[in-house]
């Protein structure tokens, strides 16, 4: 069964605040209580946009974690003046491995 991912897309109203927000999460973020979370990848897309991909063992654990993530990040969104949109999907391990293999 492929990992299930939750994707958070972050859009900041002030691009200068984004770095401060990232620093805050590095110092204060604790996601260890989310059952079944395997890893997180984060991306800086542009001066005012970022993305985080949270990987979970299975759909049930991702579905249980999504409302918790939304609630946790609500205060972050207020503090750092950003809007967060959330999506959930399956990670395509086969295609990702093939494309990554082409990079070698």
Image (cartoon, rainbow, N blue to C red):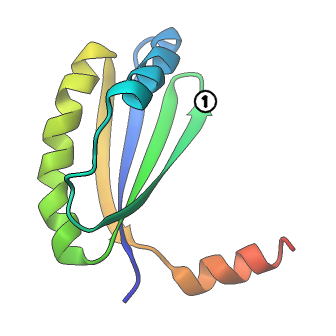
Q: Single out the residue that lies furthest toward the right.
A: 104
Q: In this view, does 97 lie to the left or right of 87?
A: right
57 displayed left or right of 59: right
- Give the labeled residue for mark 1: 46
For the point 34% across and 23% down, the residue is 82
Q: Is residue 3 above or below residue 21?
A: below
Q: Position of residue 55 (x, y in %)?
A: 38, 64
Residue nearer the viewer, 87 or 69: 69
Q: Quadrant of residue 76?
A: top left
User: Residue 58, how many percent across, how many down?
Assistant: 27, 78
- In this picture, residue 59 sits left or right of residue 39: left
- Mark 1 packing: few (<14 Cα in 10 Å), some, or many (20+)? few
Closer to the camera in the image, 50 or 64: 64
Residue at x 66% of width, y 81% of height: 97
Q: Is mark 1 on a helix, strand or loop?
A: strand
Residue 18: where, in percent of width, then height? 48, 20
Residue at x-position 73% and y-position 73%: 100
Q: Quadrant of the N terminus?
A: bottom left
Q: Residue at left 39%, top 76%?
A: 3
Q: How many marks?
A: 1
Query: Which quarter of the rendered picture does the C terminus lie within?
Result: bottom right
Q: In this view, does 31 lie above or below 95?
A: above
- In the image, residue 69 sits, relative to residue 12, either above or below, namely below
């Amino acid at each position: 069964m492929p990992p299930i991912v939750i994707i958070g897309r972050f859009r900041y109203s002030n691009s200068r605040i984004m770095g401060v927000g990232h620093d805050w999460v590095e110092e204060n973020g604790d996601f260890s209580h989310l059952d079944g979370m395997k890893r997180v990848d984060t991306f800086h897309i542009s001066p005012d946009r970022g993305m985080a991909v949270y990987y979970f063992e299975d759909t049930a654990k991702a579905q249980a974690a999504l409302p918790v993530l939304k609630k946790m990040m609500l205060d972050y969104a207020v503090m750092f003046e950003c809007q967060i949109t959330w999506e959930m999907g399956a990670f395509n391990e086969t295609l990702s491995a093939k494309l990554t293999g082409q990079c070698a």
